[in-house]
Image: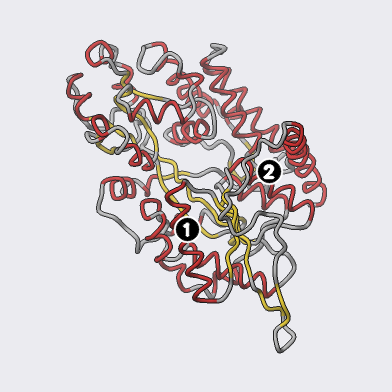
Amino acid sequence: MKKRWEQIMAVLLAGTIAVSMAACGADSKEKEPSADAGSSESQEKEKDQGSDGASEVKSIEVWFNSDEQVHDNMVKMFDAYKDKTGIEITYTNLDLDSMHDKVIASASAGNKPDVIFGLPEWISEFNAMGITADLTDYYNSWDDKNNFYDSTLEAMKVDGNYVAIPWSSTVRACLIHEDINKEAGIGTESPTWEELLDMTDYYEKTGAYPYGITCTGARAPQELLVHLAEYDLEICSEQEGGGYRNTWNENEKELENAAKVFQFYKDLVANGIVDPSSATYGWEETDVNYASGLTGMFTTGNWLANYEEEYPDTMMDTVIKAVPAPSDGKTCTYLEAKPMFVFDNGDKARMDAAFDVAAYISGKEFVETCYPAYSSRTDVKTDDKWTKDFQALTDSAVTFPPVVLGNITQAMTDSLAKALQENMDAKEVAKWLGDAINSSLKGSGELAE
């Protein structure tokens, strides 16, 4: 275990130090917290001695990520918590890339924040680093856990133990412009891969590409994960003797199906079904392309509801359906259950207070106030299509395996570049990715030999 920790920390800290040095050398371009923020990560954590000599916690430090509107609502709820409990929630609103690097640096320095919002892929990474806290005992006495979707709670586990609390979740769906599809002479049911590839006259009829794909950035491996799962493929699976392994190169049928996935991407470009520049597109381009009507259909999340005000003429005809699947496969979607980490800094009273704050942030009132459309809770629902139509797809959701994902997701993104930019044969791409995944697992000490 010690060797595994050293391997992971060596890789992660190297990147973090590089980022920090770059920031220092660039005249501090990193965005500082706003003037009304309660604190930055450097603020000293406050505690006094109570009358019985026990530690009395006066503040809990939270790092979160949100847009301006949600930020304001969250601050109001933080203030309400202090009024109710006397404990101040000091906070910093950070972009997720910066937060990730700062958490690793603070863990190395022994000065972690109390609570942070995170991404699903951080669960396995932070657990492998040994910086997550086992929250199972807290869960056992936390009655409110019964108000969460089982799938989101399961996503917070590693080796059967809870290491985080779900604060937000959403799945992916295929958004369809009904009016544009009608112009193209097709309906609003989710198309199969084969039907998509036959839409070669769609652009000529409508001026919009039939579909959109994301091939760079964080969204790319999530989309690829779903399309692989539609053929019952896992990027790696737990083996009987322990550890994880990608088995495509040891199973001809799996390799053939993985090749079909990469061939699908290649055919989308070759047949003119997606924008020819798609190989370089991240979520920023693809989300806007759908919202503005440049794309007729696109797989994404329910946050696109935020574009209705900016693009009212093109967004109001949106119909929400399942992700396109091959005719010889099955329908799947991606569950992004975002974790909230409660870190243990060696003070039991502080840890108890931090869990209470995290439970408050994931509670019904807080979620209803700040992000009801992304609720992980069964008792927070809205009647609009952006919530109910997405939630209807939850049963077919898949998630990443609980392994260190940094190099794996990068390899998944690189595999799309090899298929679309380097024009590598689809089967060769699948072989390359299988080897790259196992190489990453070996580097993190998780490979089943």
Residue 101, numbered label: 2
Q: Amino acid at mark 1?
A: Met
Q: Is residue 403 above or below residue 299?
A: below
Residue at image point 29% right, 12% down: 200
- Image x and y of residue 190, in percent: 28, 32
- Image x and y of residue 360, in percent: 49, 67
Using residue 172 as the reference point, say whether residue 440 is left or right of it: right
Query: Is residue 432 visible to us here?
Result: yes
Residue position for label 1: 74
Residue at image point 24% right, 36% down: 319
Using residue 170 as the reference point, say whether residue 359 is left or right of it: right
Using a 10 Å C-alpha cutoff, classify the residue at mark 2 as few (fewer than 14 neighbours), some (14 to 19) or many (20 or more).
some
Examine the image and state in which quarter residue 132 appears.
bottom right
Mark closer to the observer (1, 2): 1
Q: Nearer the viewer, residue 290 or 3?
A: 290
What separation in Å lies between label 1 and label 2 (alpha carbons)? 23 Å
Q: Is residue 404 above or below residue 427?
A: below
Residue at image point 38% right, 45% down: 396
Which secondary structure, mark 2?
A: helix
- Image x and y of residue 433, in percent: 60, 26
Examine the image and state in which quarter residue 269 appears.
top left
Query: Is residue 241 visible to us here?
Result: no
Using residue 370 as the reference point, say whether residue 349 is left or right of it: right
Q: Amino acid at mark 2?
A: Asp
Residue 430, numbered label: none
Would you say the residues marked 1 and 2 are in contact, meaning their CB atoms lie under 8 Å apart? no
Which secondary structure, mark 1?
A: helix
